[in-house]
Amino acid sequence: MGLGSVLFSLFFLCSRMVVADTCDYYNLGNCINVQSEGSQSFEFKPLFPENPTLVYAIDELTSTEIQIETDKDPLWQPDEAQRISFWLEYPVINTTNEAFTLSQIGMLFTNVTGELGGGNNGCDGILGQQCAENLKDVLKWMLLEEVDGSSEDEKVLHNVLSELESRPLYNLSCPHDIFDDSALTLEKALAVEAVYDDTGYTFEPEFLPSGNSSFTYTTPVDRERSYEEQVRKIGVGIVVRFPITLEPEYDPTSEQYEGGRNTTLDGIQLELVCVRAEDNNSGDGAGGDTAGEEENNENLATLTRTSLAGVLVAFMAALLTVYY
């Protein structure tokens, strides 16, 4: 590794360490002040050579934070509201592929009681195996019908989950509320895998970087309900990957259209990943002592980050002095 790469890595590390832990809700960035969160790792090769982790987070909005949103939309006047979001954390991603392939992510919610566990990344314990398998089959069929080779393909999962919200299915042996909440979805791909395909198209690989509370995958989404009600909701993550349909091109040699549809039901890779958010602030008591302890911990964490960043900056300066 050259000096330039070392310096860049150190600079990136410093910048990450001095970033504030809190999210300013006055800004419309993708971030959240986590009060509760849950996570579940799962296998999703070849896109992720090492298991990624799905994280689902909740923040109970204060009256001031609710007012910020009410000022934007005077018709929205909740007494209580919860901000929710999700993201993936992963060490490495592989977007090199001979076929143009898209991956997308979304999340449904259910209030059903049960324990996370069993197959389908914990979802069998919550939804039941029959529901989980039926849900996967229906999602694959609907995705297959949606894929058409247009720019809309980047939000195929978004469109499918929106349709299930407006026209829910009740014959899947699933909890009755699985489609009640609006799904958390993205209107862009989690990853675009491509280098070259046999129609002659070339594409630029793209992907969302590994996320965290300062870089969530969804913009702020608020639910008008109590914190206790939201914590009872189980997040049912959906991660899907499929080769895309390409517009066929006419080949004068064969006098046929080459390319065309290359998406099949068997070619759709889909995983359900279930997550329960746990309260980060749970404990034996509440009040002034707890608040003071949290403030001290935050101050200590900030001081530690600042000190470590200072050491790294000094080290960078020394390297530059030696090199030049």
Image (tube, rainbow, N blue to C red):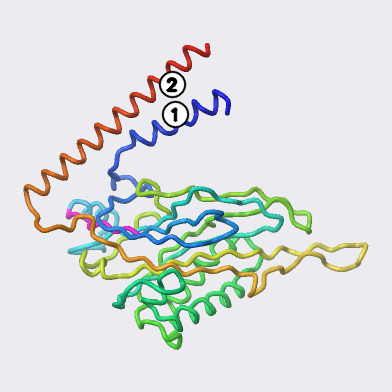
Given the current orientation, which residue lies at the most extreme front position? Answer: 118
Query: Is the residue 133 above or below the residue 273 in the image?
Result: below
Q: Nearer the viewer, residue 79 or 105?
A: 105
- Label 2 CA crowd tier, 10 Å (few <14, some 14–19, many 20+): some
Q: Secondary structure at mark 1?
A: helix
What amino acid is at disc 2? Met
Is 231 left or right of 204, judged from the image as shown? left
Residue drawn at the location 49% of the way across and 48% of the way down: 91
The label number, if any, that marks residue 11 in the structure image: 1
Q: Are marks 2 and 1 in contact (CB under 8 Å)?
A: yes
Relative to 214, does residue 304 appear above or below in the rendering?
Answer: above
- Give the structural element (helix, strand or loop) at label 2: helix
> At which x and y percent is residue 36?
27, 58
Task: Specify the quadrant that holds the N terminus.
Answer: top right
Residue, disc 2:
316
Q: Percent from the top left, x then y, of residue 172?
A: 45, 85
Lateral position of residue 102 relative to residue 213, left or right: right
Q: What amino acid is at disc 1?
A: Phe
Magenta-drawn segment: 56-63
- Farthest residue to the right: give it: 253
